[in-house]
Image: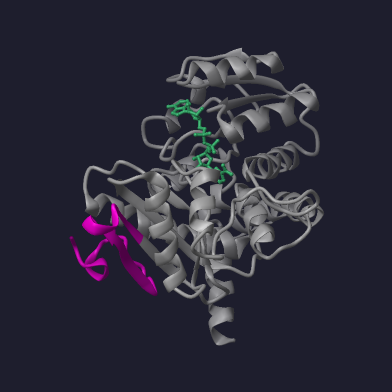
Amino acid sequence: MIDPKNHTSFDNHEQVVFVGGEAQGYAGIIAIHSTAIGPAAGGCRIWDYDSADDALTDALRLSRGMTYKNAMADLPLGGGKAVIYRINTDRVDAFQKFGEAVEKLNGRYITAEDVGASVADMRAIAGRTSYVAGIPKEHGQAGGDPSPMTALGTFVSIKALLGGSVQGRTIAVQGVGNVGFNLCRLLSEEGAKLVVADVNKANLQRAEAFGVEIAPVDQIHAVKADVFAPCALGAGLNPKTIPELGAPIICGAANNQLATEADGQRLVERGITYAPDYVVNAGGIINVSAEYLGEAADVVEARVRAIAPRVLRVLDIAKSDSITPQAAADRIVREKLAAARKG
Ligand code: NAD
């Protein structure tokens, strides 16, 4: 496998550890991007990558993304991520071994759920290390499924971008999975009109309870709406979709919505307001952070609601400095990291 330091996605990551192996029954990578602000926190993704190099690419990019997301959300955490790209033993056994690898890092990396992982997997990890979150907690304590908080952060951001109310406004939601479904619930409770698309029929049916209109999967981005909310996969904003976008505002929970940096500029040129994904979708990690730090559940909601004014501030800076919203957000984070490194 390529040396991480020679990889195009390497960004001065502090540590990249290859974990597992044939005898351990699983193979994975833990990438610690930065601990300048605090221990590197970020979920563990289980994915069937085409190659170990693809897994490394994802680990490097996602861990860097976590540094930015955590710093922007004012959490006392750095950025890290784990990917597991092969499991060839009993799943519980594999996750226990992974937990041992996390434990060996002595708290430099804190893991949690991500795509492909479950609460049961986190429980297996927790058998071997305390550096894990994403496990349901006692009543009143923060913890459990982060998706409702990710949805709340997205909802309050949409509301702020629409001047304080979603009543009678049309929101096109791409993907009604864990986050998209909760977002639709919040939007419908406050009188928004919903147009949704999903490749998963069962998830679409579940969303029908909110009186949604259904759009074809390949047309949802082009629906005439007040806001387009990507809540499915990344890279949905690209040279093909941007000319077709039907909403003047983009604000959703999906990670890595811009296929490339140039797409941020393309949106500016089309006069479309883009709320940077990692500013909007921090609700989940805010929840995970509170769980890990043993905080009460009621501190989480106030922190998640603070995402909305942060989004507006990033957009203001972008406008006044004539840069893209993504560039404005990145700059804020780089300033925070530089201040933390100075101590
Ligand atoms: P999920 O897997 O529960 O839901 C994703 C939904 O998108 C599924 O219903 C899936 O069928 C649908 N989908 C997939 N491809 C699609 C397509 N081409 N068109 C329309 N729908 C499609 O995942 P989730 O937890 O709801 O996360 C959604 C997004 O938000 C992901 O990008 C995730 O990385 C990001 N995110 C999630 C959280 C969280 O707390 N869960 C936090 C931050 C960011």
Residue plotted at (60% across, 31% down): 180
The one nearer the camera, 38 or 140, is 140
**Which picture quadrant has residue 177?**
top right
Is residue 72 a member of the stretch shown in magenta? no
- Along the line of sight, the residue nearer the viewer: 343 or 222: 343
Name of the residue lying farthest toward the bottom: 342
* Residue at figure coordinates x 74%, y 24% from the top left: 188
Query: Position of 282 compared to 327: left or right?
Result: right
Q: Residue at x 42, y 73 (%)?
A: 104
Residue 324 visible at all: no
Give above or below for 3 relative to 201: below
Magenta span has 4?
Answer: yes
Residue extent of the magenta highlight: 1-29
Toward the viewer: 46 or 285? 46
Residue 175 seen in the figure: yes
In this picture, residue 177 sits left or right of residue 167: left
Residue 215 versus residue 38 in the image, above or below: above
Quadrant including the C terminus: bottom right
Horizontal and vertical percent position of residue 250: 58, 37
Q: Residue at x 42, y 53 (%)?
A: 95
In the picture, the quarter occupied by the N terminus is bottom left
Residue 200: x, y in percent?
A: 47, 20
* Residue extending furthest toward the left: 1
Residue 244 or residue 137, whichever sits in front: 137
